[in-house]
Image (tube, rainbow, N blue to C red):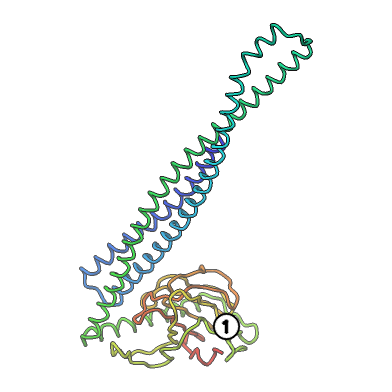
Amino acid sequence: MTIFLIILCLFSQINEKQKELNRLKQKLNNIRKEIHQLEKKKVGTLARIEKIDEGITLTIKYIDELTSQEIQEKNRIQQLDREIARLEKKMKLRKEDLRQRLIRLYKWKPFYKMEILFTKKSLPQILSSSYYLQLLARDDQRAFFEFESDWKKYLADKEMRKDLIASLKERLKEKEYELARLNNERKKKQEILNKVSKKESEKKKLAKELKSAQRKLEELIVALEKKRARHKAGKNYLELHRGKIPWPCKGTVITKFGKIIHPKYNTKTKNNGIDIKSKYGNNVYAVAPGKVVYAGRFMGYGNLVLIDHLDGYYSLYGHLAEILVNVGDEISQGRIIGRVGESGSLSGPMLHFELRKNGKPVDPLAYLD
């Protein structure tokens, strides 16, 4: 019964993980269908890139889940290998022990019958000998049942190992397929961007879309400011630590605050923050204590986190690969809020970082250490 419960528990965990993986796969398939539909409709460049980025982010997450499952299954197979080897060794010894017991009983039992008939021993001596035999029989029975229990567990472990190896093969095959899809999705995004860089009309459209995305973000911040009750409690944290604020991530500033002309697409836009070139997956930290007021996808910024630092101050973190906070979270300075990514980015993995004061963008470099 215990063996059955252990097996049931293990397979229950595997099934739950598989359901989670299936849900993620379904979501990924839906995104890919949406990308295909957008291609047919010939929508704006930014909208297409946004959807492709969403697909890339989900694909990476799905591959990570497959890898996690793969590691767990490999660990379980190793554990089963050790347990199977232990049982084989134990059963080999037990089998030999049972064989010797059977030989002893076979040889001794006929003489014991004769002893009862012709013995000169007293009754207590005969009873004592009989009691010994009963103990021996019970001990033999227990040894047999232990052997039978080990044998059932051995067969169950072997079957489970076989199933896990088959599952692992499928997992590796699926992972290989998804890695190929990921490369194709990234190539597709690059093809779109290359096409934009060669056509003047496409450049103008992209510039217009980027400005529209900026306006929508400004509208969001204004709406949040109106919604929030005014808070005045002395000088703000960001002002108190101006010039000493820690950086949101490791990296190099590739685009500064102010009006810029994109070197590849020749688009003229105003950068309301700074762009920090960083390694994909690097931690992104909150630069000051505050409350998360937005955490999700936003056109032109990919995965975006917006933190309210009170008194009209906000910090913004865009192009994240992963968001690790939720709306409403009260966070401290230095908390990890996400990972560096390329969602919505036109130039690979980076962090787009902004500081806003009363809804207006300010140069983050004036505040950072």
State left or right for residue 27 relative to residue 359: left
Q: Nearer the viewer, residue 78 or 23?
A: 78
Say left or right for 247 vs 170.
right
Look at mark 1 in the image and give the residue it sits on.
311
Q: Nearer the viewer, residue 282 or 276?
A: 282
Q: In this view of the protein, which residue sits in the foreground, 136 or 165?
A: 136
Report which quarter residue 265 is drawn in.
bottom left
Q: Is residue 174 left or right of residue 3?
A: left
- In the visual, does 186 lie left or right of 12? left
Task: Give the x, y percent position of residue 324.
Answer: 50, 69
* Rendered residue at 57%/83% (across/down): 311
Q: Position of residue 26 (x, y in %)?
A: 35, 56
Amino acid under disc 1: Asp
Report the quarter where the N terminus lies.
top right
Q: Quadrant of residue 213?
A: bottom left
Name the residue rendered at 54%, 31% in the picture. Answer: 148
- What is the secondary structure assignment of the residue under circle 1? loop
In the image, residue 313 sits, relative to residue 16, either above or below, namely: below
Furthest toward the top, the residue is 117
Q: Residue at x 62, y 26 (%)?
A: 140
Residue 360 position, x and y percent, is 47, 87
**Front in this rendered view, residue 151 or 284:** 151
Image location (x, y in percent) of residue 17: 45, 53
Q: Quadrant of the C terminus?
A: bottom right
Above or below: residue 121 compared with residue 101: above
Q: Residues within 10 Å of mark 1 (few under 14, many from 20)?
A: some
